[in-house]
Image: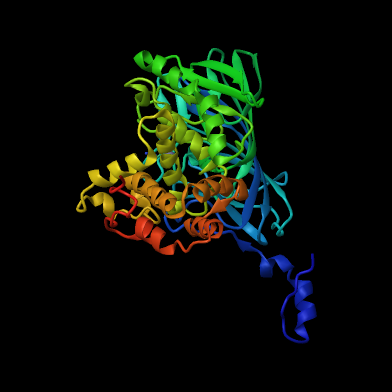
Amino acid sequence: MHRRLIVPGAIAASLMLAIPASAANFQPGAPGIGDPYYPASGNGGYDVGHYDLRLKYQPATDLLEGTATLIATPTQDLSRFNLDLGLTTHEVRVNGRKAEFRTSGAQELEVTPASPLPRNRPVSVVVRYSGKPSEVKIGGWTAWHRTPDGGVAAQEPDSAAWWFPSNDHPLDKATFDVSVSVPDGTQAISNGVLQSQSSRLGWTRFNWRSDKPQATYLATLAVGRFDITTDTTAGGLPVLNAYSKDLGANAGAARASLERTAEVAEWLEEVFGPYPFNALGGYVPNVRSGYALETQTRPFYSPRQFASGSNVSVVVHELAHQWYGDSVSVEGWKDIWINEGFARYSQWLWSEKEGEGTAQELADWVYASRPADDPFWTVKPGDPGPDDQFHVAVYDRGALALQALRNEIGDEDFFRILKGWPTERAYGNAEVADFVAYAERISGKRLGALFDTWLYQPSKPQAPAATGDRT
Ligand code: ARG
Ligand code: ZN
């Protein structure tokens, strides 16, 4: 590739001889990818295509150690670049050669390769690292769940920096091979298909592969003592569920919920189109927290979700995210409604199908149960701000927006949109505005005012005619 240097007149030729092009054109990659909600998330200047993680984890001490190999492509002429990692780095190699590195802040690993990296030429980056994830604090908190028998990485908007170096933002998706060695009798769970498992010298290695583009926050690792069930769907996909051996009284309800994963996915395929990934399942570690997460192909569930009995609704929610969130991902975290509004609405559709209340009835109920002075209505699902990214309004008001859309355009176009969008945007990223434009295209209606009312106004919208006063 030829680079043009703009140097005036006669000195140009001699300058070009004296100064390598790199000195003039090669620049550091930005330390953030440019997300206003989380300026330090991700990095600029390159795109990762594949992560290969080869790790070892000791539950007794919470020590994680290993090697990450990234295959990446510079998107600019790079003099240096950043990775996001909270653990301790011992060595970095770029294209096989030792690179200089230093850490800055809690999560920035700054790498200066021995020679600069030209744009568009793929590079390999090897990072040797170790540490105790439970001791890593980034922005004052930890995404790592320490459990009595191991640990779990599953958090949103990020968890990657607690266990592997990455370009930690949904804009840069990649495929993953995750190989983790743990003491015999312990299991390591991750995304995708368990390719193989073997034991030697008292350690068992689990080799996982997630072969479709995956955002870094959707990569998961769980180490602990699990009961594992396996099956194959009617369509031939492997299903693998993992239950901590330490779920106590919640064990039965957890199984009664997760074992319906294939059934729920089959139903969701009717609504959203073909399942986008190569495997199915879920896992329930013995964490104390109460949330779930749509970790790709294998959602994470907390035992507390099964404290009152089976909870298929949460399975519906996390599986809906496989289309809305995992395959079609946010472009920036302000777009979180693209994920949560639809995952919540899918729970309403499931309720409708199960005869436990229609989506319209649930919308009416949510609307009526929130008086106009409820702070719920001050949250704008279309741009909630980082502090309210997971506010219940993003979910419930976000689903109300979809019910308003359904009433405005009718069931035929509404369901055409629900199915068409994940197909058209599969494995990509999207903004809220992209969805609005898509809904307008499919329905042939102007929908700007409707979405502005339901997603962007910090006040309780007037009940639409179709809501509340139906006969
Ligand atoms: N996307 C997750 C869900 O749908 C939300 C996780 C939010 N994280 C949290 N710590 N509350 O359930
Ligand atoms: Zn969700």
Q: Residue at x 57, y 22 (%)?
A: 240
Q: Residue at x 45, y 44 (%)?
A: 342
Q: Is residue 25 left or right of residue 18?
A: left
Q: Is residue 454 visible?
A: yes
Name the image quarter holding the N terminus: bottom right
Quarter of the rendering containing residue 232: top right
Name the image quarter holding the C terminus: top left
Q: Is residue 288 left or right of residue 434?
A: left
Whether residue 91 is situated above or below residue 42 in the rendered picture: above
Q: Nearer the viewer, residue 419 or 385?
A: 419
Q: Nearer the viewer, residue 200 or 287?
A: 287
Image coordinates of residue 419 in percent, x first then y, are: 56, 44
Image coordinates of residue 331 in percent, x first then y, are: 52, 54
Q: Is residue 58 left or right of residue 10?
A: left
Q: Is residue 32 visible?
A: no
Total marks in image: 0
Q: Is residue 262 left or right of residue 381?
A: right
Image coordinates of residue 291 in percent, x first then y, are: 38, 33
Q: Residue at the front extreme? A: 471
Image coordinates of residue 96 in percent, x first then y, are: 72, 44
Q: Quadrant of ligand 1?
A: top left
Q: Nearer the viewer, residue 69 or 402?
A: 402
